[in-house]
Image: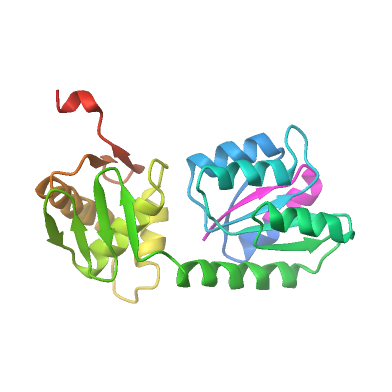
Amino acid sequence: MRLLLAEDEKEMSAALSAILTHSGYDVDAVYDGQAAVEKALSQSYDCMIFDIMMPKKDGVQALKEIRDKGNMTPVIMLTAKAEIDDRITGLDAGADDYLTKPFAMGELLARLRSLTRRSTSYAPSKLTVGNVELDVEEQELACRNSIRLANKETKLMKFFMANAGKTLSTAQIFDNVWGDEEDDVDEGIVFLYVSYLREKLEAVQADIEIVGQRGQDYALTVKEASAEG
């Protein structure tokens, strides 16, 4: 799973990053609130950890901006202050949980596991990007007409639509869609299923497309209007 860590104290950031990486997470570390906003809106994360006191924008300001853009990735707020007002401000801004420094690393890891499980459980059953709707429960992709998807096609399309406009690496896609597989599959299967989805998007006359090349990064984007031209 991929995490965004926004912590301006570089020694603390390095220590947290090392432990989180050792625990199996991929960590992107930034050191101010503006960088956190930019990363959160351009990349896909399973959870984000924001310190409240940061330069440029504090954690609360950064979180408000991210939530205003419709990004609902789970967020844990870190604060060195114990006052109840800090906790309320962070939660009101859209934080899912908070920890007061100093905290036990085991508690942070437990809260990360809880939040990522919860966000998966409460994922929407219908998603819309451009003129295309995905009904996850019915495994149906619809636009000017509709088409049924296989289980993995649905899971992959859901991941793309939940992260529309964001750059997604082949490895990240593989981990999210096939990470729980016991079968002998590798990252090459991502391109195969992207190809299937591209055909089905064409079949329903979608105004969105999956851009990217085999083994590299992909993104779900709305087609330029001039393409209809």
The stretch in magenta equals 1-17
Say if residue 187 shows up in the picture: no
The answer to whether residue 84 is magenta is: no
Question: Residue drawn at (11%, 53%), measured in percent from left and top?
Answer: 145
The answer to whether residue 5 is magenta is: yes
Q: In x, y percent, where is residue 68?
A: 56, 43
Which image quadrant is residue 111 in? bottom right
Q: In x, y percent, where is residue 171?
A: 40, 54
Please state if 167 lies on the left or on the right of 5 as rendered: left
Question: Residue drawn at (17%, 27%), measured in percent from left and top?
Answer: 227
Which image quadrant is residue 212 in? top left
> Dividing the image into 4 quarters, which one contains the C terminus?
top left
Between 83 and 43, the one nearer to me in the picture: 83
Question: Residue drawn at (80%, 69%), measured in percent from left and top?
Answer: 104
Which image quadrant is residue 154 in? bottom left
Vertical order, 129 against 151 (above or below): above
Please state if 79 lies on the left or on the right of 38 as rendered: right
